[in-house]
Amino acid sequence: MTDPADDDLEPEPTDDTTEDAADDTPVDAGETLFYESGGSWWVVLIGPVLVGVVLGMEISGPGQVHWLVLGIFFVVLTGFSLLQVYAARQHTSVHLTERTLRQGTKTMNLDDIAKIYPENNATEHKDWESAPALGELSGVPRRRKGIGVKLESGKVAQAWARDGDRFRSELTQAWQAVKMGL
């Protein structure tokens, strides 16, 4: 049983809190429209599988089993692949919602985009194709396709994803909806 006097001790929440005033991302980013993880966890299995194959060969063949060496290789291969996949998932993931775009660890509001450039199907190079990538990376990651965007600040940059065509379509539709106030 609770004491009714205890209810008066907690302050009532107000709608005008300024806790996260520095964070400019909306509270409700909306539905996820496009997502790419950036890296796949199956890559971590390569080291243990290779060590298992070598262990099987050593057990079935003549001579001794090199437990220490295989253990070291297991730890090194698994550790490096874990590190690589974790970094890829952090820095090359893409998450597009109805109001925000996250490229790696950087999130921006879609209303910060002034223009989305059309795809370049011509042979000549467009200026946006040499622009820096959105996010913390200096360039578009390997095996990703860049989509040219002009930001409200006047800066030209590239949004990027593996499935560039679908990402361009989803990004354009979400951006247009934000600009129309939907």
Image (spheres, rainbow, N blue to C red):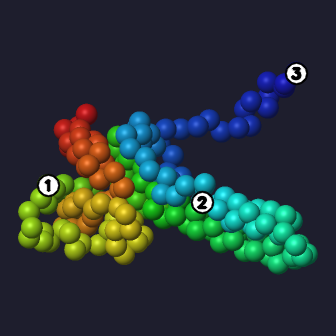
Point out residue 54 in the picture as x, y percentages from the top left corner: 76, 68
Say whether residue 70 is left or right of residue 82. Answer: right
Q: Quadrant of residue 145?
A: bottom left
Query: Which circle, 1 or 2, is nearer the viewer?
Result: 2
The Cα atoms of the two marked residues, 1 and 2, are separated by: 35 Å
Element class at badge 1: loop
Residue in view at x 81 percent, y 73 percent: 70
Query: Which circle, 3 or 2, is nearer the viewer?
Result: 2
Sequence order check, earlier mark of 3 and 2: 3
Tell me, yes or no, if residue 26 can be seen here.
no
Q: Quadrant of residue 114?
A: bottom left
Residue 84 vertical position relative to residue 2 in the rendered view, above or below: below
Q: Amino acid at mark 3?
A: Met
Residue occupied by mark 3 = 1
Q: Quadrant of residue 41?
A: bottom right
> Could you classify mark 1 by the number of other residues whose Cα lies within 10 Å: few (under 14), some (14-19), or many (20 or more)?
few
Residue in view at x 80 percent, y 62 percent: 56
Point out residue 132 in the picture as x, y percentages from the top left corner: 29, 72
Residue in view at x 74 percent, y 37 percent: 9
Residue in view at x 52 percent, y 58 percent: 39
The Cα atoms of the two marked residues, 3 and 2, are separated by: 54 Å
Point out residue 77 in the picture as x, y percentages from the top left corner: 69, 71
Element class at badge 3: loop
Residue occupied by mark 2 = 43
Element class at badge 2: helix
Point out residue 93 in the picture as x, y percentages from the top left corner: 46, 57
Sequence order check, earlier mark of 1 and 3: 3
Which disc, if any, is residue 88?
A: none
Say whether residue 41 is left or right of residue 96. Answer: right
Q: Amino acid at mark 2?
A: Val
Quadrant placement of the N terminus: top right
Residue occupied by mark 1 = 118
